[in-house]
Image (spheres, rainbow, N blue to C red):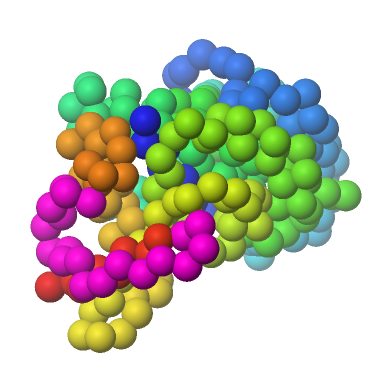
Amino acid sequence: MLKILFSPAENKKNGGNEEKKELFGAHNSREVILNEYNSIIQCADMQKIKELFGLKKESDCAPYIVDIFDTPLMSAIERYDGVAYDSLDFASLGKEAKEYLRKNTLIFSNLYGPLLGGDTIVNYKVKQGNSIGRYAPEKFYKERFSYQLDLYLANSDILDLRAGYYDKFYDLKKPHTTLKFLKDGKVVSHWAKAYRGLVLRAVALNNISSLDAFMRMEIETLYVKEILKKGLRTEVVYDIR
């Protein structure tokens, strides 16, 4: 089966009505960093809270100052709300495509670490690159989850749609495919998020089960310019037209 590695988003939808479930890996160490996060937001030290969230105004912090162990839950693939997720437009997908994304998308969260799309999480705030108290999330999760990810991905094809920062959470040790997007001959940077979301949407709609099937799939406005191979990585370069 094809597994797709994906990034989270700074913004998230509020609310949620899903039940708590066991998260990817069922790893007890995740509770350590969740407890650290919760203790910071419950400590009433607004300077620490603003630094963690990457926010300047106390009023902007208010929605996130809650007990994360007693807060509404929503699946990760629905919770995140940014450029990539706007392009994915999960809500408009059919039942089968939604289930595909819940089962086959791995999202690398700054708070929770690796999550399946269907894992249920709270509305939280951690600025990318920030430590959570004593812990740097990318190091914390790389040390504790890499072996489990190796096992989980061992028999799957891998499409890596993560933004570069999230490579820090996990190094792939088997063949995988990444994407690059060009517009008028120039590499697209920020808006690459939107095209990753479009690709993820197309993959779900077409129920893609392998990289071979992915390479045969046509995606509107994206045309394969070249395919580059280096070591374990195959990079598909798209022209945007």
| 160 on left or right of 31 | left
- The residue at 66%/31% (across/down) is 148
Image spot of residue 28 (x, y percent): 77, 24
How many discs mark residues in the rendered view?
Answer: 0
- Relative to residue 43, is residue 58 depicted above or below? below
Is 26 magenta? The answer is no
Q: Is residue 191 above or below residue 114?
A: below
220 vs 14, nearest the viewer? 220
* Nearest to the observer: residue 42 or residue 239: 239
Rendering coords of residue 214 (x, y %): 25, 46
Residue, far bottom: 185
- Residue 56 in percent (x, y) is at 66, 65
Quadrant (top left/top right/bottom left/bottom right) for the C terminus = bottom left
Q: Residue 27 appears in which quarter of the rendering?
A: top right
- Asked if one can make out residue 54 in the rendered structure from this viewpoint, the answer is yes
Q: In the shown orientation, is residue 130 left or right of residue 152?
A: right
Name the residue at 57% across, 15% down: 21
Residue nearest the observer in this picture, 208 or 91: 208
Q: Is residue 178 above or below residue 77?
A: below
Asked if the magenta segment contains residue 226, the reply would be yes
Q: Quadrant of residue 168?
A: bottom right
Position of residue 53 measured from the top left corner of the image (x, y, whole percent): 67, 54
* Range shown magenta: 215-233
**Quadrant of the image for the N terminus?**
top left
- Left or right of 216? Residue 55 is right
Residue located 72% across and 59% down the image: 130
